[in-house]
Amino acid sequence: MSQADPTSLAGKTFPLRDGYDHVVIGAGDAGIAAAQAAAAAGAKTLLVDEHPLDPGLFGLDIPYLFGERVDAATRNAGRMEERIVAARPGLIAAMEAGVEVALGVAAWGGFVRGVANRGLPRPVLGLADREAAWLVAVDRITVATGARDVVVPFAGWTLPGVMGARGFDAALRLYGAFSGRRIAVIGGGALADGVVAAARAAGLDVAAQIAAPTPVRIEGREEVAGIAWQDGDTWRETACDTVVMAVDTVPMVDLAELLGCPIAWDAAKGGFAPQPTPQVAIVGDALGAAPAARAAWLDIALAEDHALVCACEEVSAGDLRALRPPRYLDAAGPEAGLGALGPLNQDQVKRLTRAGMGACQGRRCRESVHALLSRHRPAPLASYRAPIRPLPLSVLAALEEDPALRANWTGWFGIAAQWLPHWEPAPENAEYIGGRLSGAEVVK
Amino acid sequence: MIVIVGGGVTGLSTAFWLAREGHPVTVVEKGIVGWEASGRNGGGCTHPYSPLFREEQRLWPMMDELLGHPTEWRPHRLKVALDEGQLDRLWKSTKLATDQGFEAAPLDRAELRDLVPWVGDNAVGGIHWKYGGHANPQRTSQAYAWAVERHGGRILQHTAVRGIRTQGGRAVAVETSAGEIGCDAVVIAAGPHTAALAAPLGHRVPMAPARVEMIVTEPLPPIAYGGVDGNGLYGRQTLRGNLAYGGGPHEWIDLDGEATPRPVNSPVVASLARRLNELFPRLGHVRVIRSWGGIVENTPDGRPILDRLEDPGNVVVASMSSVGFGLSPATGRALAQLVLQGHCDFADLSQLTLSRFGNLPLDWRSRQGWEAMPA
């Protein structure tokens, strides 16, 4: 082979800040235990956790449904770090066991060698704090990313004050920053019971627990003021400042998918659940912890055409069924609605309706959209793509870059003949049929 | 029956123009229509180096109406230069269009900033192309497919083509995973798989597949002309307001059978963010929410192959060599003419024949440095 195409990835590197034998993502109980075990076996081990979060992420409901019920203390990263260490004493033990612990560090990317990605000698993780993104190489990865909230899109769910069980737990017990006083809980299983118990232990009022699937309306103008639910033939209601949706959680499989773990629908594990690979282990709630409990609730909520499924892009259940283009186009969908597509695929429906395309990266609507598309059989997993945490341009831009990559940057392939009139013969060039753009011309 | 192999924009547009004139067509797609490069590109509709440029410019303003569904097409492009070298190269590519009678105007930094408030003090100037434009690739791909069906054409998704049966110098049937389809003509428009489909017919269609990447940000308030690019990036502000940009290094790959490999992302996404932040320094706080990859193919000279074969004489081969979306309204119309009458009457395609690669050495990929990295 002659010299490799200089505008291609061949011969380029991705500069690494560090390398590890083992990186664990997620510092819950399972992640801490995995990191301690790795360090005890002599592995150079890094344990990262995205908490305390970049404050901007609370408002985007990433990674949990926080419902704007965290107080201003969450803006103080140092103070939050202290609280997190206090809430998770295992972190100190892990550090003492030799684990490098990085709090406030999110894993936004996972890059592994594959048929269309051969440039990486070892798996690489993309990490970021509030200022900069960087890469680390790693031999073994443990995904301990836990589970995230499931939204049941009842009327009023986008009001400030509607949270998920995981968001509530993080606000209350991890950050010590829950700002509500009187909560209503939707859900009847162990998850909801745990929310009720934690709330009572914290001295909060529990105004109601709506345990069995039933129509629900969340009331309020600027924020949650109360909740109403159907009880037999009548509607009951109560005042509250917070509604905790504790119907279900789903394993957080975003990073596992980027790392090439097979992911399959398994209702017994809560939905899409990941499998390990030789390089990637999965532990804790990320594996899938409990059977999916949401179907009956989602059926009720999604029966309403006006149910707002995707809040980022304002897509309703009716819009999805009609496969209606986004509102800014003011156009009808195909006559057959979803029936115009053949076998349903969530990524395809996303492209056409924008459901799941917004800033929360689909975290609040994935399960609803999937349920709508899975009447006959489970639709395939909607893909995850880096960055799996939304990162400011300036943070990603701070990632160190191979000077050779920069020097040879070109807009598109750098084939000179491609940009010359195609009605004239391509320039003769025995070695490079298309002719390469010169060094001075590569940045188109 | 005319069978189109490949449900990307090139094949779908060909099927659209044929079906619109009442010809029976079947599009055979191994996956979902528009799923690969057709739905994963920058959406640009501005290709002045192509003989199909005029037709591209003529057709786009009509496509929403022709297809019956919105394509999100919007006219004009704005080019931003961060140094004199970039500005000089931009004017060179502008000349390709102005020589054909299209209009472009220089923009100083202040004028540029009036149109694109995100531009910073590092911009030296720009150019307003009063031609070209951009559209939504995913919506457009699907719009072609629905238009084909509305005109009576058939689209078989999740159906793979296994071979083309010939008899007496003509293709008589297309063998698929769902059975055989008898045919009067075939169009192979299968992107990087075109080579493997044409090989059993005795034709070498030289092409090399590659993986490329793009990023997308959260939405920003829409500006007047969303088709803004520069600094080695191509892309646009979508009508929703997101910035979708690509560029930079590609990875040459090998195909493994009839499947298209999943076009994963690499840390190049951070390099894209860096250049986008250089292009729009006021947007450092704007969040990147997603990225994607796509698999495209390039011919040895980077130019399309749009050709009707001599043997079998009823087979048309089409590759757009990695630049197919924007030209697709015109390409499909040209290919429909190649199928029906053997030549295109509105554009000179004489340089885009397969025969120009007749003397190509067998190891051309290696000679060009276009081989996949070692497995």
Image (cartoon, rainbow, N blue to C red):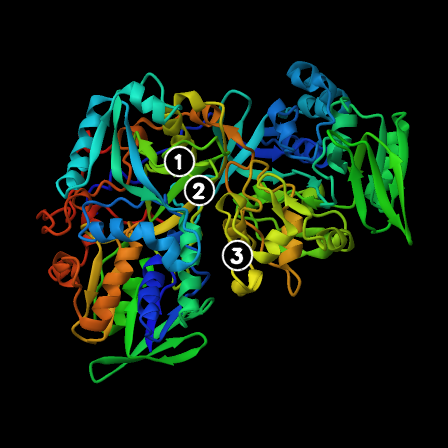
SS label for mark 1 = helix
Q: Residue at x 77, y 22 (%)?
A: A176
Q: Looking at the image, can residue A48 be seen? A: yes
Measure how far apart labels 3 and 2 are at the Cα level.
31 Å
Residue B19 x %, y %: 35, 70
Q: Chain of mark 3?
A: A
**In the foreground, B171 or A356:** A356
Residue kind at label 2, given as amino acid type: Asn
Instruction: Give residue B268's mark.
Output: 1
- Using the rendered view, name the quadrant where residue A178 is placed: top right
Q: Which residue is mark 3?
A: A333
SS label for mark 3 = loop
Q: Chain of mark 1?
A: B
Say whether mark 2 and mark 3 are on the same chain.
Answer: no
Instruction: Indicate whether B138 appears above or below A60.
Output: below
- Residue A224 horizontal side relative to residue B351, left or right: right
Residue kind at label 3, given as amino acid type: Gly
Measure how far apart labels 2 and 1 are at the Cα level.
7 Å
- Residue A416 horizontal side relative to residue A175, left or right: left
**In the foreground, A87 or B151:** B151
Residue kind at label 1, given as amino acid type: Val
Q: Are the residues tagged 2 and 1 within 8 Å (C-beta)?
A: yes
Q: Residue at x 30, y 38 (%)?
A: B76
Q: How many marks?
A: 3
For the N terminus of chain B, give its image quadrant: bottom left
